[in-house]
Image (spheres, rainbow, N blue to C red):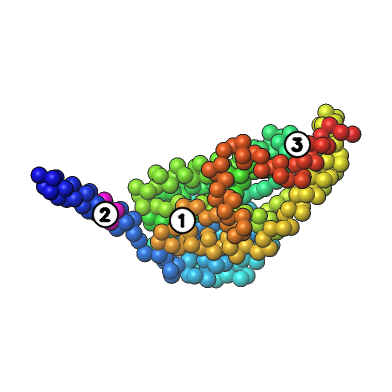
Amino acid sequence: MHAVLLVGQIIGIFSIFAALLFVIAKLISCHYRSPVEDGYGYAVLITGCDSGFGHQLALCLDQKGFVVFAGCLSPEGAGAQSLMRRSSSNLKILKLDVTSDEDVQQAKRMVQNNLPVKGLWAVVNNAGISDWGEIEWSTFNDFRNMVDVNLFGCIRTSVAFLPLVRAAKGQMVYVSSIFAFFNCLNMGAYSVSKRGLEAFADCLRVEMASFGVKVSIIQPGNFGQATNILKMKSGSDIWEKFDDEHKQIFNRQYIELANEYFIMSCKSGFKDAEMVIRAMLHAVTAAQPKTRYLLVSAMDRVFFQLIPFFPTALTDAVFSLSSMYAKRKEMLYSQ
């Protein structure tokens, strides 16, 4: 009797195991597709190609045979003109201010009228701006300008071009930042815009899975020197915008110290964008692109991979280890 029961249990376990293997195999087969090693016949739209990541990615994809629609804020500017000189006839410059409904719709018409045979394979939402400053140093307009470009600009572009990408069962790529999940002093407005962007991309990924469209998020670390995205300003620039109340709270010495610390931090980052460009190329061309590409140094990787799982009290306490944070507490309200 016991032997019969044992045999029945073994058969039951193997049946469940076989069923799981069958389901996994079906899921893999349903989602498998070949990588796009040769871009011939495919188009890619990239926003923010005047400089930085977008500029370099546009040139790389052009060399791989893609038709590249390079969205530039200033088509007559030095960045756009450099792209035209260094690329093939497959690269087309578009005037594209992602905060403008008119620009986005005009770009869409341009793309539709010039699509190659295999359609629009990917949209890389790269356009973005950055600034720094504590929340009390910022105005509502500072937050609005940041969100208009980094979040709403991506949403506006995505909604317009999704039907074309869906038809090609292609890829949507979003350039975010480690500041989407790492709460850092002086980066409040930027973090708000990037955290919102990742929420949008995560929701879109779930919705697009049914259509065979992949969605990837690029999370660069400190690449300020490689892109010139960071807005440099002096302590005086910040101080002169303060009213009397803020000048009493944040004294002039602290403002100068914060500015020096920020500039020093930027200079300690990556000098070139090669790591980011490789990740963006993989997100555009791979058969199974990653959901997220965390792009930091090997030393920082462990920290940033673990920090989402830490209790809030512990992640906030990380700042107490910074000499800058300690000096800040000492200098507030001092004359």
Residue 91 seen in this snapshot: no
| Quadrant of the rendering where the C terminus is positioned | top right
Q: Secondary structure at mark 1?
A: loop
Looking at this rendering, what residue extends furthest in the top direction? Answer: 245
Q: Is residue 99 left or right of residue 133?
A: left
267 and 304: which is toward the camera? 304
Q: Are marks 3 and 1 in contact (CB under 8 Å)?
A: no
- Circle 3 residue: 137
Crowd band around label 3 with a 10 angstrom C-alpha radius: few (<14), some (14–19), many (20+): some
Q: Is residue 27 left or right of residue 320?
A: left
Q: Secondary structure at mark 2?
A: helix
Specify the amino acid type for callout 3: Trp
- Circle 1 residue: 290
41 and 258: which is toward the camera? 258
- Circle 2 residue: 21
Residue 327 seen in this snapshot: yes
The residues bearing labels 2 and 3 have C-alpha atoms spaced at a distance of: 56 Å
